[in-house]
Amino acid sequence: MFSLLIVILITNSLFSQRDSTIVKNVKAINKINIAKDVYNPLSPSKAAFYSAILPGMGQIYNKKYWKAPIVWGVLGGTTFLYIDNNSIYKRYRTAFRLRKAGLQDEFTLDNGTSLISETGLESAQKQLRENRDLALLSSVLVYVLQIVEASVNAHLLQFNTNDNLSFKPVLIPDNMKFTNTAVGFNLKYDF
């Protein structure tokens, strides 16, 4: 009982003592200076906004100039495919309607022989409509993906990627256990 009382009194006095100069020194040493230009929380939203207004502008805002022509090329290609398939679809649709009305269309010769049958006109319309819709879906998908890419890239540009941040796996044998293999994980970081 007496030894328990001594242990309680000793530990109580150890925890209750504090040197104010040590605390001041610790606070002065552990100051962290944060650079003001390193993190901009509005940068990802600005990049996404610029990409939504004009495709490719978010990539230019992120200073990834080589990505903008790729965005423009892919969007231009899918837009061209949409316009081309839509115009050809309208030609076949008009020809089908004229033929159903008993009039001459562009796929019927002057002597009355038709170059494309009615079922051929119907199947061409169906295929061209599918191609047109696929081109429109591709355009919308590319538009949305370039907005997301600009926003994610703006987020990732703000991360610290210097050489002190690294991951290197190392195998360390356990000298105490010769028969069993142990796997472990060690994380080392410097600031």
Image (cartoon, rainbow, N blue to C red):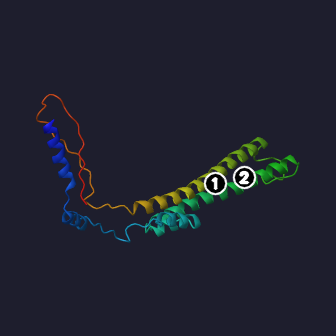
Tell me the quarter of the image containing the N terminus: top left
The answer to which quarter of the image holds residue 140 is: bottom right
Q: Nearer the viewer, residue 73 or 91?
A: 73
Coordinates of residue 30 in the picture (x, y in percent): 25, 64
Q: Nearer the viewer, residue 179 or 70?
A: 179
Which mark is in front, 2 or 1?
A: 1
Coordinates of residue 70 in the picture (x, y in percent): 49, 62
Q: Nearer the viewer, residue 21 or 182?
A: 21
Judge whether 65 appears above or below 147 on screen: below
Question: Circle 1 sits in a helix, a strand or a loop, which is it?
Answer: helix
| Farthest residue, direction left | 175
Q: Is residue 95 visible?
A: yes
Question: Which mark is first along the chain, 1 or 2?
Answer: 2
> Which amino acid type corresponds to the residue marked 1 in the rendered image?
Leu
Judge whether 129 appears above or below 29 on screen: above
> Which amino acid type corresponds to the residue marked 2 in the rendered image?
Tyr
For this view, does 73 lie left or right of residue 89?
left
- The residue wearing badge 1 is 136
**Which circle marks residue 153 in the picture?**
none
For this view, does 23 lie left or right of residue 41?
left
Question: Circle 2 sits in a helix, a strand or a loop, which is it?
Answer: helix
- The residue wearing badge 2 is 89
